[in-house]
Image (spheres, grey):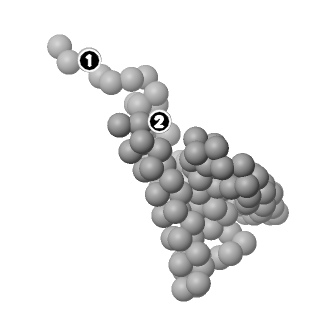
Amino acid sequence: MEYYFWESVGWTADIFFVSAYALVSRKKLDPEGAAYNSMNLIGAVLYGTYAAYKIAIPVIVLEIIWGSIAASALWKAFSMTAKALVLWEWFLTKTKIPALWKRFSRGPEKKS
């Protein structure tokens, strides 16, 4: 069972990388935008974790570099202008994410 868990982590990372590349290639995502770099950062973390499980040192080093580049690009994307902060605030107030987070962070509801 553990084998399948780790393989799914690796495949999920692949999906993030390939999806990010495909969306940028088709001009659906901005290569300097937060969405693209978030997908790369998530992919790097997942694939780095998978590589650590497989003890693949060259891949671990690559994913640390890849993730660092994505994280610095994300930092730039979010700190470049005040507009990014305004959009983030709008996202949190207009979506149900905070309510869902509160719901799931307190655990499953008890049935009486």
The total of numbered circles placed on residues is 2
For disc 2, the neighbor class at 10 Å (few under 14, some 14 to 19, many from 20) is few
Please, is residue 88 above or below residue 36 in the view? above
Q: Position of residue 55 (x, y in %)?
A: 64, 44
Q: Position of residue 105 (x, y in %)?
A: 46, 27
Element at label 2: helix
Residue that label 1 marks? 110
| Chain-order first, disc 2 or disc 1 | 2
Q: Amino acid at mark 1?
A: Lys
- Residue at the location (50% across, 39% down)? 98
Q: Which mark is residue 31?
A: none
Element at label 1: loop
Pick the residue in front: 85 or 75: 75
- Residue at the location (51% across, 53% down)? 10
Residue that label 2 marks? 101
From where the camera sits, is residue 13 visible? yes
Pick the residue in front: 20 or 49: 49
Q: Amino acid at mark 2?
A: Trp
